Image (cartoon, rainbow, N blue to C red):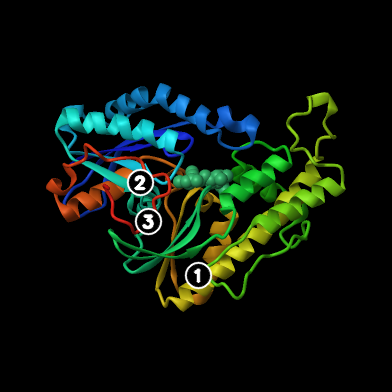
Amino acid sequence: MYILGVETSCDETAAAVLEFGDGSAPKVLSNVVASQHEIHARYGGVVPELAARRHVEMIAPVLEAALEEASVSAKKIDAVAVTRGPGLVVALLVGLSAAKGLAWSLGVPLIGVHHLDGHVHSLYLPTGEESDAPPPFPHLGFVVSGGHTDFYRVDGHAEVTHLGGTLDDALGEAYDKVAAIMGLGYPGGPIVDRLHAKFLEANGSGADPVQFPRPFLEDRPYAFSFSGLKTAVLNYQKERGLYLSDRNLPPWARPQDVPEEVACAVAAGFQEAAVEVLVEKVSGVVRRENLPAVSVSGGVAANSYLRVKLGERAEQEGWSLHFPARKYCTDNAAMIACAGGFRLTEHGRESFMDYADMDADPSWELGEASNG
Ligand code: KG4
Ligand code: ZN
């Protein structure tokens, strides 16, 4: 069975073809991602109208490339899976309209997938490492991306319960804002991760970077709040005249560039504080929920320091820890096709044929009915 996945919820136009066999992990035949990072970089975050316009330009070539790379003709597609929400409505609508039209013309089912269900399902795509097993059921699903820092109890492919999450900025968003404050570019996560690694290389692993507060929120075990940490970085920069986020100033009127050693020490301080909070919270929640395993997905799951620190804690405490392959951490359509394929297997083709009125749902909560 061939599933075509489509994803346009934010700033990636993506399409993928997966082959589902008899119970084994799905095969990824193609996974095409057209990123818009360079369009949004100068704004330090995603501009919805620019994102939508670019999706309109890219959706047809990306779909064609995904089919061509998979060597599967459109006529052979058994179902289309598309991100229906949450996300930017003007962006979601581009992928949804294209997917609906395609499914309609091919006479195949259309599965409306929750974007976070996609991230949770990125764990069921092959990582390329034989030693990696997909997480067992039940497990704690931790989604940490540009829009979410949320805990889920995952009892099965279609049984996902929200346990709690961030009260304000998602961690990925905090990474992006901190990088914007420092004039480092977008998306911030990989840049901050690299500067932290540079700091450790230059100063040794025991060195102390700039100290920032750790928002543990001890009385709210499932909640996060990163806005205070972000403001602490902003204040640190401002106090030293290193505040660079006023992009309205012409380049010659801006404050001096942040010297690299300072940028590295600030990035390291931010990342160490954020990851320490993350590790403590995951450890607390997995204990409270009495679960044997944890999966981490979403863009921030690509972070190398987080992978190391969480891995150390998992080993100390005896729970198993699962990450997707790095290419499936940030937004992609393979994870959407994967979630769609499992839903189709579980509910059957007929449950997904009545999609003429399917609409985008920018604020859809995971756990609500799909295909509404
Ligand atoms: O999952 P994703 O592609 O989009 C959303 O669903 O939001 O996540 C994007 C976020 C961005 O905020 C980006 O800065 C962050 O993931 N990110 C990272 C890394 N790679 C991407 N954060 C930390 N470390 C990384 N290596
Ligand atoms: Zn995402």
Using residue 172 as the reference point, say whether residue 152 is left or right of it.
Answer: left
Q: Which residue is mark 3?
A: 366
Which circle, 3 or 1, is nearer the viewer? 3
> Which callout, 3 or 2, points at the residue further toward the start of the chain?
2
Q: Residue at x 77, y 38 (%)?
A: 244
Task: From this view, report whether residue 51 is shown above or below residue 210.
Answer: above
Residue type, mark 1 in image:
Ala
Residue at point 18%, 27% (across, down): 105
Q: For residue 201, say whether it is visible.
A: no
| Type of amino acid at the residue the image marks with label 2 | Met
User: Which-is-in-front pick, marks 2 and 1?
Assistant: 2
Q: Position of residue 70 (x, y in %)?
A: 27, 32
Quarter of the rendering containing residue 353: top left
Q: CA distance from mark 3 to mark 1?
A: 26 Å
Label 2 CB sits under 8 Å from any ligand 2 atom: no
Callout 1: SS: helix
Give SS at disc 3: loop
Q: Nearer the viewer, residue 354 or 162?
A: 354
Q: Amino acid at mark 3?
A: Leu
The image shows residue 40, relative to residue 203, as above or below, that is: above
Pointer 3 local density, CA inside 10 Å: few below 14, some 14–19, many at least 20: some
What distance separates the C-alpha of mark 3 from that of mark 2? 15 Å
Query: Is disc 1 surrounded by few (<14), some (14 to 19) or many (20+) residues within 10 Å?
Result: some
Res 336 seen here: yes
Mark found first going from the N terminus, 3 or 1:
1
| C-alpha gap between disc 2 and disc 1 | 25 Å
Q: Residue at x 30, y 50 (%)?
A: 339
Residue, disc 1: 314
Residue 335's tag is: 2
First reached walking from the N terminus: tag 2 or tag 1: 1
Which residue: 33% across, 57% down?
368
Where residue 132 appears, as percent x and y from the top left, is: 38, 58
